[in-house]
């Protein structure tokens, strides 16, 4: 992964899709137009909570906003976490299931070549635990290792997270297709 010199102030891609895949594709296609011939990766990620009908979903970064469907109204992690905890206040623990989802799109010259999916299933706690990570990590308990994502080491996060799973899927595809995709 290399930064592109001179591209520190690119315009923001429009994230108005209804799914993580739509938003990842939009971002990858948009940014790939700025670097002709290069493979560009973009992701869209968030949390889906079953008791909230899959919300926050694609609105994860701005869930506490008055109008979460508008991308310009991002809210901070504390506000989003507080909003989820309020909404789950009366939900019993056995119904507080959810997942982190990540979709990575690979594009070149405005065309998506492939998408890669990752998820991590867990339980949404009644309070925040741990000081690492960001976003919803402190409330997302991951049963296989009995920790929240905010309590994971960097190595554990890479191994168990939704982003790690999606990126491993990308790497497998890239290894299989190098030479055929012109990378």
Image (cartoon, rainbow, N blue to C red):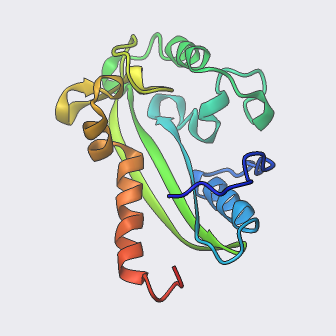
Judge from the rendering whether residue 163 lies leftward or rightward of residue 5; answer left or right: left
* Residue 86 or residue 154, whichever sits in front: 154
Determine the residue located farthest toward the front in the rendered image: 5
Q: Based on the displayed image, in which of its 4 quarters is residue 166 positioned?
A: bottom left
Judge from the rendering whether residue 43 lies leftward or rightward of residue 162; answer left or right: right
Point out residue 100 in the picture as x, y percentages from the top left corner. Answer: 43, 40
- For the point 56% across and 63% down, the residue is 105
Point out residue 19 in the picture as x, y percentages from the top left corner. Answer: 61, 52
* Residue 68 or residue 24, whichever sits in front: 24
- For the point 28% across and 29% down, the residue is 152
- For the point 18% across and 32% down, the residue is 145
* Residue 119 or residue 6, whichever sits in front: 6
Determine the residue located farthest toward the left in the rendered image: 145
Q: Can residue 27 be seen in this view?
A: yes
Point out residue 64 in the picture as x, y percentages from the top left corner. Answer: 66, 20
Q: Can residue 70 be seen in this view?
A: no
Q: Based on the displayed image, in which of its 4 quarters is residue 167 positioned?
A: bottom left
The image shows residue 163, relative to residue 154, as above or below, that is below
* Residue 3 or residue 85, whichever sits in front: 3
Point out residue 128 in the picture as x, y percentages from the top left corner. Answer: 40, 13
Judge from the rendering whether residue 48 lies leftward or rightward of residue 29; answer left or right: left
The image shows residue 177, relative to residue 133, as above or below, that is below
The image shows residue 125, relative to residue 176, as above or below, that is above
Q: Based on the displayed image, in which of its 4 quarters is residue 83 positioned?
A: top right
- For the point 48% across and 17% down, the residue is 88
The image shows residue 117, relative to residue 84, as above or below, that is below
Tag count: 0
């Amino acid at each position: 992964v290399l930064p592109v010199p001179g591209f520190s102030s690119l315009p923001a891609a429009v994230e108005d899709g209804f799914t993580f895949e739509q938003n990842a594709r939009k971002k990858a296609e948009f940014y790939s137009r700025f670097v002709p011939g290069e493979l560009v990766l973009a992701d869209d990620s968030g949390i889906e909570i079953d008791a909230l009908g899959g919300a926050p979903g694609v609105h994860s970064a701005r869930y506490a906003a008055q109008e979460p469907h508008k991308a310009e109204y991002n809210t901070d992690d504390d506000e989003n976490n507080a909003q989820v905890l309020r909404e789950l206040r009366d939900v019993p623990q056995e119904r507080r299931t959810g997942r982190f989802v990540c979709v990575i799109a690979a594009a070149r010259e405005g065309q998506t070549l492939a998408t890669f999916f990752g998820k991590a299933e867990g339980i949404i706690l009644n309070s925040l635990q741990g000081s690492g990570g960001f976003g919803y990590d402190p409330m997302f308990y991951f049963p296989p290792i009995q920790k929240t994502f905010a309590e994971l080491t960097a190595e554990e996060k890479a191994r168990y997270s939704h982003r790690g799973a999606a990126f491993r899927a990308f790497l497998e595809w890239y290894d299989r297709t190098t030479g055929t995709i012109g990378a």
